[in-house]
Each structure stands twice: as C-alpha cells, then as structure tokens.
Image (cartoon, rainbow, N blue to C red):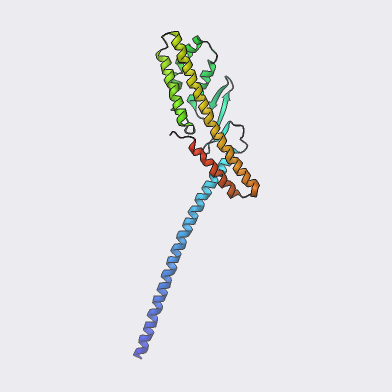
Amino acid sequence: MKNLKNVIGLTVITGLLVTSCMDDKKNKQSDITDSETNQEVKLEANSNAMYSNSDKLVANNKNRSDGNTATTKTGNVVTRSVNTKVNAMQISGWDGFNKLSIEMKKIEGADFKTKSAEIPNMGPIIASLQSTRPDWMKTEEITEDIEDVQKEYNEYIKEQNGKEKRNVRNLEELNEAYDDLVEEINETFDKYVKINRKANEEYKEEIMDDGDLDDAREEYIEEIKKLNKVADDK
C-alpha cells in the first residue's frame, strides 16, 4: 500500500511538472508572438506614414508642369511668379528678395542720377535677404551671392560721395552681383521642378505598367528623396 501511495505521489508530481513546463513554453511563445506582432504593427505604421507623405506630394504635384510651381521636401507648394505691375520675379515666402526684386526692376534702365538717389534706400531690404530667406532656398551658392550683393552695396554706399566714375563702376558691380543672385535663385527653383517632374513620371509609369500602387509609391519616394540635397546650407 505504501509503495502504491509513493507511485501515485510521483505520478501527480510528474504531471504537475509537465503541465508547468508546457505553461512556461506557451507563455514564452505568446511573448514572442506579441513581440513580433508589435514589430509588424510598427513597420506597417512607418510604411503607411511614408506612403501617406508620398501620396500627399503626388497630390500636390498633380497637373503642375508649368515650371513655376514645385513641392519642397516638407510637402509645401512653392511658386515662382511675376509682379505684374513692374514685371519683377517673386519667390514664395521670401519677403526680402521679393521687395528687392521690385525695387531693382523699378530703376532698370534709369539714368545714373535716378539710380544714385534710389539705391541708398534699399539698405534695410538688402540687409533682410538672409533673415527672410525660406529654408528651401538655403543653398551655399545663394548664400554666397547674397553676401556679394551686400558687400557691393556697402562699397557703393561707402564711396557714393566720391568721384562719379568710381560710383558708376560700383553701381555696375552691384547690378552684376544682383543678377548673379537672380540667376542662382532660378537655377535652384529649376532643380525643384526637375525633381518633382521626374518623381511624377516614375509614379505614372509604374501605374501605367502594372497598376501596382505600392511599386509606384516606392519609385516616387526614391526620386523625391533628391529634394533633401537641394537646400544644403542650413
């Protein structure tokens, strides 16, 4: 009888140990499954966010092929336009440049006397070129051109009461520095336009090819990443 009790006791203990091991294994498997599920959820969320941003950019870019509208890396729509009153170029969000562009256009073709009277009034506007410049226009080349405009302006103001011949030369150098700035701004804007167009083309080609939206998004994202390299002077 004693041996029978021992056997029964051992059987019960063994059963409990087996059950405990099985429960531990189930718990570990459950933890692993929960961890994998959480990772999958995070990956899906990141993927959806990326796709959402690309869809936003595609939507913003739709039917914009005039060369004067583009989308920045933040998804903001920016424009290059003309002030119709004086035919002066204007850039989205750049107050300092837009004002200077108008003032320079007003004296374009004027005689030296008229320019000499107007140029000194542009000091505050020229001084604001850096501080009012939007992030998407912050390139090293534009920074250098702004510094040149400010340098030539200061030279002109410093020597404006000197000989007329020297003043004429200083004014010509200021005009050249300004023209260089305008040229660089246009080239930078054209880069945005080119990248946007290429991304749109890749997106549309994938859609037309097999209608796979995910592939189209991936192609778009790959191209639109190049916007990050345009503004390189922050």
Please state, as top left, top right, bottom left or bottom right, where the C terminus lies in the image: top left
Q: Which residue is pictured at 63% across the width and 46% down the height?
A: 207
User: Residue 4 falls in which quadrant of the image?
Assistant: bottom left
Give the percent coordinates (x, y) of residue 169.
Answer: 46, 13
Determine if residue 78 is in view.
no
In the current view of this chain or complex, which residue is farthest to the bottom? 1
Q: Is residue 101 above or below residue 225?
A: above
Residue that protrudes farthest toward the top in the picture: 163
Q: Is residue 181 visible?
A: yes
Residue 222 falls left or right of residue 206: left
Instruction: Work out whether 23 lies above or below 125.
Output: below
Q: Residue at x 58, y 21 (%)?
A: 87
Residue closest to the eye, 61 or 179: 179
User: Residue 107, image x and y in percent?
Assistant: 53, 15
Q: Quadrant of the N terminus?
A: bottom left
Coordinates of residue 221 in the picture (x, y in percent): 54, 44
Q: Position of residue 181 (x, y in %)?
A: 49, 25
Which residue appears at 51% of the width and 27% of the height?
184
Above or below: residue 85 compared with residue 79: above
